[in-house]
Amino acid sequence: MFRYCSLFSGSSGNSFFVQSDNTNILIDAGVSSKKIILALR
């Protein structure tokens, strides 16, 4: 199964989470780690 989620998208930064059965990928450009952790929860 393949899933993706846009966590943030805007002028302050972008962040996307992609997940498959065995892999998790976080693509981040300019968003703070604190914001990402809160969004993933």
Image (cartoon, rainbow, N blue to C red):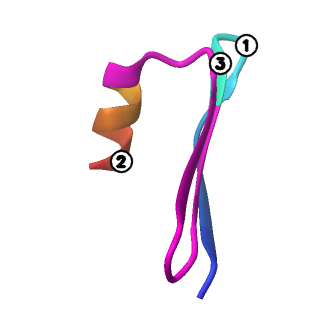
Give the magenta-colored segment's residue range: 15-34
37 or 24: which is nearer to us? 24
* Residue 25 placement, left or right of 32: right
* Residue 24 % position (x, y): 51, 61
Name the front one of labels 1 and 2.
Answer: 2
Residue at image position (57%, 53%) is 25
Dividing the picture into quadrants, the one containing residue 33 is: top left
The CA distance from mark 3 to mark 1 is 6 Å
Local secondary structure at mark 3: strand
**Identity, as a three-letter code, of the amino acid under mark 3:** Gly
1 or 2: tag closer to the N-terminus: 1
Q: Is residue 15 left or right of residue 41?
A: right
Return the mark for residue 40: 2
The earlier-in-sequence mark between 2 and 3 is 3
Instruction: State the mark number for residue 11.
Output: 1
In the image, residue 30 lies at what x, y percent?
61, 14
Q: Which residue is mark 3?
A: 13
Report helix, strand or loop for mark 2: helix
Tag 1: amino acid = Ser
CA distance separating discs 2 and 3: 16 Å
Query: Residue farthest to the right?
Result: 11
